[in-house]
Amino acid sequence: MVACIIALFVFAVLSIFSAKYRALAKEAFRCAFLKITFRPCEGALDSKIKARVLSRLYDTSPKAAAVVGRHFEMFSWLFLILTVASGIIVAQGLYNIYMYGSCDPVHPEQCLIGAFWQQPICPNSFEGISVGPANAKVLIIEFGCFTCSYTKSSEGTIRNILEKYSNNVRYVFKTYPLPTHDNSLEAAAASICANNQGKYWEYRALLFADQAKIVKEGKTYLISLAETINMNTTSFTSCLSDSTTLKQIALMQDEAVTSKISGTPTFFVNHKYVKPDDLQRVVEEELKK
């Protein structure tokens, strides 16, 4: 049965590129279906595959062919497991590319299609929400998305750095709502509107606290969050769709494109790109210089 399932995977892919494999793909599908329903494979495709594999292997190494022949079912299972695992990894990579612009959003340089990835370039402007002294020894710039789970996972590190080194670190957050994330633009606008009322950090904590509700409920939930921290909801609601707010976001989105940002969060420390996992270490190294 295992050989039939493996053949189904292989011939299904090959049939996309060549018509000569389509008949084999159909036979493999029929064979796998019969085996799964506990019926014998009509064309004995599994036996043909085994004979073909052992014949090729025998020409190279008779001993290896004998070992594989005795344990053919076990090797077939191992190959099937590797095939399925590879398929899952590829599917995950494609999903990440669609959602985040890189098959590995946290470490985009490690992406298997790294040839298409370019290291981010630090922007020249300080457009965004900032905190810390202008003459701080360390400057951190982050491009982040409020509905991105990876951005949320780095929030603890950012908070820790700002608490420990508040007098020596300046932090600039550039909101970069990912277009494939529902209500990410609305969340970005809401953060700016909260900043206009002096409630940015309180509201930011609420945004990261329950991303699922933001994605699901959008503007309604964002307004309810503003109410919980006693913001003026009338001006807040008006601000969400205000052209000035949307223009601020558009400027940061344009910066992200120019800076070749492939995913969020993306960090720069003293104008150099830094991986999220290395952020704390690099900041501390810069402070010691």
Image (cartoon, grey):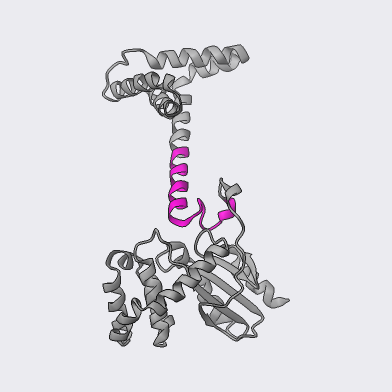
On the question of residue 205 being in view, the answer is no
Could you tell me which residue is drawn at 34 percent across and 62 percent down? Answer: 182
Which quadrant of the figure has residue 60?
A: top right
Could you tell me which residue is drawn at 47 percent across and 51 percent down? Answer: 97
Image vertical order of residue 1 relative to residue 165, above or below: above
Could you tell me which residue is drawn at 68 percent across and 74 percent down? Answer: 286
Region in magenta:
86-110
Image vertical order of residue 247 relative to residue 52, above or below: below
Decide which of 15, 156 is in the foreground and name it. 15
Where does the image place residue 93, in percent across and percent down from the top left? 47, 47
Quarter in which the N terminus is drawn? top left
170 magenta-colored: no
Q: Main secondary structure of the magenta part?
A: helix
89 magenta-colored: yes
Where does the image place residue 35, in percent across and percent down from the top left? 31, 22
Q: Residue furthest right?
A: 289
Decide which of 132, 241 is in the foreground and name it. 241
